Image (cartoon, helix red, strand yellow):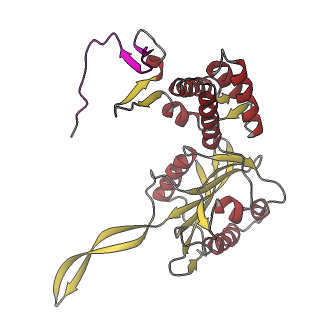
Amino acid sequence: MIIQHAILHILDTNTGSLIASQAEMNVDNAGVHDYIDKIVAKVMQGDIKTGHLTAENYLKKSLAQDDFATMTTQLAAKLFDTMAGSEAIHPGDLLSFQATMDEGPVFGLIKLDFAPRYAHAVEYEDDKMVNNLVLNQAVLPAATQMVSEAILVDLNDDSYQLLEKKYLIDGHRVPYFSEKFLEIKPDISVKENIQTIKRTVKNIAEKYDEPEHEALAITQTVIHDSIEATGEIDTDKIAEKVFNNNISAKQEYTEKVTEKAIPKTVAVPNTTKYEKKYRVQKFKLDSGIELSIPIDIYQDHSKVEFVNNADGTMSLVLKDIASIVNKFSV
């Protein structure tokens, strides 16, 4: 990453103070460069939403300005006013930058929430030096820590990657960062699409008396394999694999995901995150036993098998075990 511009504005809603920086940071400072580089990498690993800016978007119009400090100050002022509408939104700093990455020129906005942290302070009492503890209410997140709100805009094609969470505003949970501050409507995130797919599979499996644990395990396997192969989730493959022998269930699943506006292929921008997340199948039995089984082992019936018993219960058989290692640690 080559950083051309970077500036930090303080949005301290606790004290009602917007402290806008009048000049940019020194981007030749190795510490500044390293912090921005690492925190951008964390943003891109999050549950991001995607979309494209249009000429009518507030952010697109802002980016047309030439003066970086003035433009980002206006953005900071609007974000500050938006944050003031909810006590649930954490005060913080707004980091704005422009850089050149592998993909091309990028503009970024990252909100860095304040976190209270204790530090030592050397003070004097009655001419005696005392090392005291003081609480700093405005410590920024570490470069390796995930942030809550951010947007990265590809300046070549106006596509963006957005990271945000919902906060309680006027009695409703609202994605204030995109809706009220940036005034954009991103596409549904990969996480939200997967949650909808999971609920749909679960409901239809229950309706058609299909084993829920098996339907969800197959769904996870299809999602993992699809992402690994193409970087996308193929919803038709889920229908085919999960409800292969049940035409009615397969048809209803397809109808439901269409009703919920889930595309036939869901693009996954951060494939590494989801490949890692879904490479292990996790089960919790009614006895309290919890299992984590690598996805390739779960698919091998010579290693793992669920058996339906005559009395309606199930047995889980683990086979071909050469050794057992206790994972007790301190």
Q: Residue at x 58, y 23 (%)?
A: 210
From the viewer's side, name the closer residue of 211 and 281: 211
Q: Residue at x 63, y 43 (%)?
A: 192
Residue 102 included in the magenta stretch of the image? no
Location of residue 174 with respect to 47 vertically, above or below: below
Picture quadrant of residue 131: bottom left
| Residue 98 x %, y % | 65, 56
Q: Magenta region, mostly helix, strand or loop?
A: loop
Picture quadrant of residue 182: bottom right
User: In the displayed structure, does residue 64 sit left or right of residue 287?
Assistant: right
| Residue 278 x %, y % | 51, 31
Location of residue 147 with respect to 138 vertically, above or below: above
| Residue 25 x %, y % | 55, 66
From the viewer's side, name the closer residue of 280 and 28: 280
Residue 306 included in the magenta stretch of the image? yes
Residue 247 seen: yes
Q: Residue at x 24, y 81 (%)?
A: 123
Give the residue at the far right of this rendering: 55
Count of picture labels: 0
Give the residue at the far bottom of this rendering: 126
User: In the displayed structure, does residue 36 sit left or right of residue 321?
Assistant: right
Q: Report the magenta residues as a range.
A: 303-328
Quarter of the image with the C terminus is: top left
Picture quadrant of residue 60: bottom right
Residue 159 seen: no
| Residue 39 x %, y % | 51, 52
